[in-house]
Amino acid sequence: ILDEPSSGLDPAGAKEMREIVRAEAERGATVFFSSHILEQVDAVCDRVGILRDGELVAEDSVEGLREAVGGEETLEVAAAGADDDAVAAVRALPGVSGVTRDGDELVVNCASDAKTDVIAALEDAGVAVADFHTREASLEDLFLAYTEGDAASSDSEEADSGPTGVDPTDPGPTADDEPAEEEVDR
């Protein structure tokens, strides 16, 4: 169990710590690694647990957490001449959840399978696409989604509501309970 294992280490020491943790995992050991330095967690861990208010709200591989949150990616496009009409055309595409423009750069949040549609829509609108690259949600993005965003809201609602039709104060059947009589039509 490692709590903030790279705290106080220089970059060479942090790298050596990551190598030791990986070697132990490859040997078959289970290593619990607690850290607020999410880049190191992402670099070392096979599975990640996210805590909110002391409770485990998510546990999966980083890729599994991405898929559970919606699997969106960020597409950054160098798009000279992207006017309001081009931005509106991109916003209207299925799978696109957000578009921001900063000068000649567009930042598009979209499903992975919508990326080619975004580029095509820009080109159809007469925009010269000079360059583009994608970025998956970072572990920090995922942490914030689970602790502050929509994933946090839906998880807490599910946790608070419990299974439908079950009274959480009912201890359930006991050995002293008699079987209920049942009426059967024949």
Image (cartoon, rainbow, N blue to C red):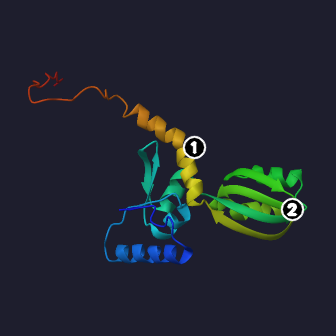
**Which residue occupies the foreground of this view, 128 or 44?**
44
Amino acid type indicated by mark 2: Asp
Residue 71 in view (yes/no)? no
Q: Which mark is residue 70?
A: none
Residue 65 placement, left or right of 120: left
Q: Residue at x 60, y 59 (%)?
A: 137
Q: Quadrant of residue 107?
A: bottom right
Real-space Cα distance between discs 1 and 2?
A: 31 Å
- From the viewer's perspective, is 94 left or right of 5? right
Where is residue 139 shown, x and y percent of the image?
55, 59
Q: Nearer the viewer, mark 1 or mark 2?
A: 1
In the displayed structure, 50 sits above or below 160; it is: below
SS assignment at label 2: loop
Which quarter of the figure has residue 174? top left
> x, y (%) of residue 76?
74, 63
The reply to whether dot 1 and dot 2 touch (C-beta < 8 Å) is: no
Q: Which of 31/105 is in front?
A: 31
Report whether 55 appears left or right of 134.
Answer: left
Residue 81's place in the image compared with 181, above or below, is below
Q: Is the residue marked by circle 2 packed among few (<14), some (14-19), or many (20+) residues within 10 Å?
A: some
> In the rendered view, would you say 112 is above or below 130?
above
Residue depicted at x 55% and y 65%: 39
At a point 83% along the width and 56% down the height, the residue shown is: 102
Q: Secondary structure at mark 1?
A: loop
Tell me where residue 49 appears, x and y as whole percent: 43, 55
Amino acid type of disc 1? Glu
The residue beneath circle 1 is 148
Q: Quadrant of the C terminus?
A: top left
Residue to which mark 2 is pinned? 104
Q: The N terminus is located in which quarter?
A: bottom left
Earlier along the polypeptide chain: callout 1 or callout 2?
Answer: 2
